[in-house]
Amino acid sequence: MSKQISRRDFLKLATAGAATTAVLTGCGPTSRFVSREPYLKMPEYTYNGMSTYYATTCRECAAACGLVVRTMQGRAIKVEGNANNPVNLGKTCARGQATLQGLYNPDRVENPVKQARGAQLSQETLDWNAAIQIVSDALKNTKPSEIAFLMGMAPDHLFDLVSDLAKAIGAPAPIRFGALGMFEARATLSKAAEDLFGKASMPFFDLENADVVISFGSNFLETWLSPVALTRGFAKMRRGNPERRGYFVQFEARMSQTASKADEWIPLRPGTESLVALALGRLIAEAKGGSLPPAFASVDPLTAAADAGVQLEVLERLAQALVKANRPLVIPGGAALGQSNGLAVAESVLALNALLGNFGLPGGVFISPLAPAQDAYHRPASAKEMTDFIAKMKNGGVKVLFVHGVNPVFELPKHLGFAEALAAVPQVISFATFPDETALASDYIFPDHHGLESWGYQRAVVSAKPVLSGAQPVVTPYFNTRATADVFLAAAALAGGKFAEALPFADEVAFIQSKLTQLVGEEGFFTAPEINSFTAYFQQYGGWWTSDPALATPSAANAIAKRFTPAAAEFAGEGEFFFLPFVSPTLGEAGANKPWLQELADPTTTVMWNTWVEMNPVTAHELGIENDDIVEIVSEAGSVEAPVYLYPAIRPDVIAMPFGQGHTAYGRFASGRGANPADVLGSHFNEAGDLAFAGMKVAVKKTGKTKVLSRLESRIGVYGEGLEKE
Amino acid sequence: MTVDLNKLHAVGAIAEEAEGKWGMVIDMDLCTGCQACVAACAMENNIPYVEEVDAGYGRSMHWIRTERFWEGEYPEVKMSAYQPMLCQQCGKAPCEPVCPAFATVHSQAEQINLQVYNRCVGTRYCANNCPYQVRSFNWRDYQDSRVRPEITILANQFNPDVTVRRRGVMEKCTFCIQRIHKAQDKAKSEGREVEDGEFTTACAQACPANAITFGRIDHPESLVAQLARSPRAEHHLEELGTLPRVTYLKEG
């Protein structure tokens, strides 16, 4: 009698098989990609109705949040956070959720193409062998000093590979840039840490353990550095301790999404942030008694308050609150740093923290640890460094430019002239996944996989524990794309000689393993005795991180002793309004091509699918401007047009505009939609080289045109009703 | 005078003496308005985007949205807490008795408010009668590749556990019923009850601030039931007697 297997038993076995293979997937070269098959022809490890989950890393920004992607029949269905990853602990932001609409975007670059700098995506496809030959020739036949690599802020493994290649062949080190880094003013933070703590690094603000938090313009709940990690920190600060509710004050000229969560929003006159920080310091020092530290000796709180447009009593009350707090914390960031005196703002805020004595204490200021497999803190290029690079391109110093993961034609202020400089480079090779502005202006596009189809790793920026978040393909590549790392490896092998010696790896995974080798045997979330087990665990758990925090304590001495000259920021231009650009909280720098990110309502204005200009209703009334009237914003560097949104929580002398729209390319959902505030930004920098993006004065002109903004909050505008009354 | 709400219930609605089965608690003090829940909900439930023009006409189909209200004028202007608003899965749902097609009915098993798409004939009476304005009408074949060519590729992402709706039907939050069923099936096959926290809705799972908690409100020890007993708890439009299953925690 033959043994019968019931349907139930069969399903049990099938489940066990699926679980086993899920763990093993990716262990050997044969299984380096999962495959996408028709529903009728099932890959052997998938079963009808059963999902397979893969851990990987989000590439929508560079924060290194871990993801677990649910796949069925080789299709990616849903993104969830990786609960193990210390950066996001199982959570995601809206951009992470919508990354699937980037993967299955109708406007991807589907094949390698000879773009020839056309206005549209070229249809002249090449095969990958020809593409590799072109890259190889470009590397081999160009003087190394005239090769340039321009990389995005993610992924880190490709940056490491290109850095190794550049070093070995004697080319200049790759340049890293991203609009988020520019608007975050990362160079300023790093320079302030260097000046006061002796070493360039990323300061770490222990938000979750603080009980009174004052932020100078930092938009940490939106896009700043690592929004998911900082939102969790905010939530713990607010409600993490049952004994008390955290108190949060935001100084900012406009009520941003972050400021809308504050208990007190204090609209400072733009440019007076360092005066207010120093004045707070002086008031605190006086309240504490003893000798006045040099940092705060030369500021007069009364004048500072008057300059900032704040009552002195408010500053005195806040100083008292900070003195009484057990764990006070002051955070600098965002537009406060993107001004002519941004470095002074960052340093005076760090000095204020030093005075409060919170360095190295819970809820205080630390120095971020280096990530695993990282030699030193490398910040992305500042806008000043990009300007120098643009000059080099214009002067013929760059003969071959490789671009990956960044779209500087769109992201940099138009005034800096990146597009014109690009025209002066004889050969531009883009590895863009999407047909963005920079890719279209290239000679060739050799498309990289989407992040969810890619191998890689990314280092965490904001994390107490050093985190190396691992990426693996969750689906097989949908189009005829190829990993840029593999293209470089193949091109180097083809070029032979020093190129092949620089990158002696069979493929991308072998390269990644070579970087992971140094972590074998290290104590951490998991410890593996040899590289193959390490790589298997690295994929299964979505990365490697230490079990304990590794924060360093900065020295407070220099910060307190630094003598500041209190001065407000200088503003460029003649207009009557301060111009305050901010990164769209829902779109980020590169979300405009995902329809569901467009469909999300902006948290504060509820506008969807467009760009708006925020203006105080009283100011608008004086100028005779109504909701949805299109205005022209004119700065010394350029002009831009967008409809007005009467925003009740903005200073009357400030107008604000979100960054993220205004594409001329980048697919059907982004192209021709909205306006780009970078078109009016100039070429003024702060002492750290960051763009003074919030340091412009602009004029506002009526155009007589209107464009009704689609908002979630109002349903009458499009019918033409209520326009007169509003 | 106390009103016995069970005596007031409209014909067609099922009276529930108990507090319900599944419940949600949303901490408005933590919600940062970041829209992660909205995006997660859209990805989980195959919710179509309607694009700019239809969105301007109020046809956008968010099953969950964050509301905020202004008070006062500059400089004394204040914004209310963000209020994530979704179907409150009312114990006495005003949408139910008005449906002529019995398309919106109460599930006796799960005690939540169902929307049966293939019964719905699109009268929109339910949306008209919903005090929370959380029902969205599907005006066009947004998910049909013959109407929108890009759906051919975007459809790869669709969740096979959730129906793709055509035009002419009303849609709303289902408390991720597909996840409820999946967790229950799994627990049943393993001969046990569903544990608290074993699964959650897409919005709660994504929320970076952990402002949303979902679970068995009728189990006193569950996290959601404990949070619902907070002194900060309130129900929106409680005076209407709808018995909402979503509890909000105030600021302060």
Image: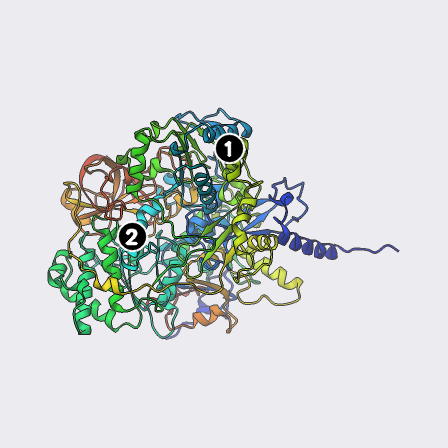
Depth check, mark 1 against mark 2: the one in front is 2
> Which sits earlier in the primary sequence, circle 1 or circle 2?
1
Instruction: Compare residues A385 and B85 and report the one nearer the observer.
Output: A385
Residue in front for this viewpoint, A548 or A214: A548
SS at mark 1? Answer: loop
Chain of the residue where label 2 is placed in the rendered structure: A
Residue bearing mark 1: A110
Answer whether labels 1 and 2 touch (C-beta < 8 Å).
no
Q: Amino acid at mark 2?
A: Lys
Q: Is residue A522 visible?
A: yes
Q: Is residue A500 above or below residue A189?
A: above
Residue B194: quadrant of the picture: bottom right
**Residue ranking furthest to the right:** A1
Q: How far apart are the alpha carbons under marks 1 and 2?
A: 41 Å
- Residue at 59% from the left image edge and 47% from the top image edge: A72
Q: Is residue A29 above or below residue A143?
A: below
| Residue A100 in the image, given as x and y percentages of width and height | 49, 45
Q: Position of residue A530 (x, y in %)?
A: 60, 55
A449 in relation to A517, above or below: above
Q: Quadrant of residue A6?
A: bottom right
How packed is label 1: few (under 14 Cα within 10 Å), some, or many (20 or more)?
many
The disc label shown at residue A607, or none: none
- Residue type of the residue flagged with mark 1: Glu
Instruction: Tell which subunit mark 1 falls on.
Output: A
What residue would you read off at disc 2? Answer: A191
